Image: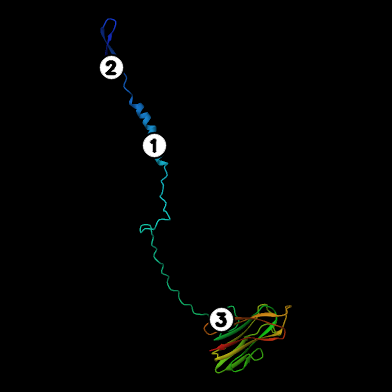
Amino acid sequence: MKSENTTFYNTDDNSEHILTVKRKKFPWWVLLFLLIPLFFVIKCHFDNEVAVVPQVDSTQKDTVANIVVQEPKIEEPKPIEEPQKDDKQFQGEGGDLRINLQWYSETDLDLKVTDPCGQEIRYKKRTATCNGGTGKLDVDANVDSAPEYTMTPQENVFFTNPSKGDYIIKVHCYEKREDKPVVDFNITIIDRNGNRKDFPGKVKQRETVTVTTWKEE
């Protein structure tokens, strides 16, 4: 505590008096008490402040700094797949030329193929030779002598070293065993290179239809 002397005069008798006044010093800890809460208030303010990320204006032109250049992906060339000569969904041999008949009932259809020499391969004549090439009927489905009929029948004629020329393909309905007026069928031809072509058709009871003429070159 600090003491200070103060001089004053008495106006009544004009006498001089000295008064000693003791002044109290401001306590430092009070200031510290006030500053500590202020410090935490300021700190919390900055901690809770969310940083604002400047948005890119889409109307601005791209600069070199904000353009990301992606290197083009180089794809490795795929290996060339060899065509499959024999499709697993078909019954019988594939040979160098396959002519396959499919239908979906217990009806008995017959596949007939006439080669360039004019010989017709069918259920009564299953093999024929033409100019060194051989054709054979190796699958005959739903015949009268079969122990049971199938709902997914096929007939198949294949040629080994087929001669050049026209092959006339026909379908005959030998016995219709379904209530529909016509029987739907499909002919699939696959050549020596694995190229495939389908020919859908319809046939009536005891009818023979010419489906297509295949030209072997």
Residue that carries the numbered disc 2 in the rendered image: 3
Q: In terms of sequence position, does the residue under pointer 3 or pointer 2 come before the other?
A: 2
Q: Is the residue marked by circle 1 packed among few (<14), some (14-19), or many (20+) residues within 10 Å?
A: few
Q: Is the residue marked by circle 2 packed among few (<14), some (14-19), or many (20+) residues within 10 Å?
A: few
Residue that carries the numbered disc 1 in the rendered image: 42
Query: Quick check: marks 3 and 2 in contact, CB under 8 Å?
Result: no
Residue 93 placement, left or right of 179: left
> Is 164 or 51 nearer to us in this picture?
51
Which three-letter amino acid code belongs to the residue tagged 1?
Answer: Ile
Tell me which residue sits at (40%, 41%) in the image. Answer: 47
Which image quadrant is residue 36 in?
top left
How many numbered discs sit on the rendered protein? 3
Task: List x then y, in percent, for residue 182.
Answer: 71, 80
Q: CA distance from mark 1 to mark 2?
A: 39 Å
Tell me which residue sits at (27%, 16%) in the image. Answer: 4
Query: Any mark on residue 106, and which?
Result: none
Tag 3's secondary structure? strand
Query: Any mark on residue 196, and which?
Result: 3
Tag 2's secondary structure? strand
Is label 1 or label 3 in front? 1
Q: Is the residue marked by circle 3 packed among few (<14), some (14-19), or many (20+) residues within 10 Å?
A: some
Which image quadrant is residue 60 in?
bottom left
> Is 143 or 59 nearer to us in this picture?
59
Q: CA distance from mark 1 to mark 3?
A: 82 Å
Task: List x then y, in percent, for residue 144.
Answer: 71, 85
Q: CA distance from mark 3 to mark 2?
A: 121 Å
Task: List x then y, in percent, for residue 20.
Answer: 28, 13
Residue 33 placement, left or right of 112: left
Which three-letter amino acid code belongs to the residue tagged 2?
Answer: Ser
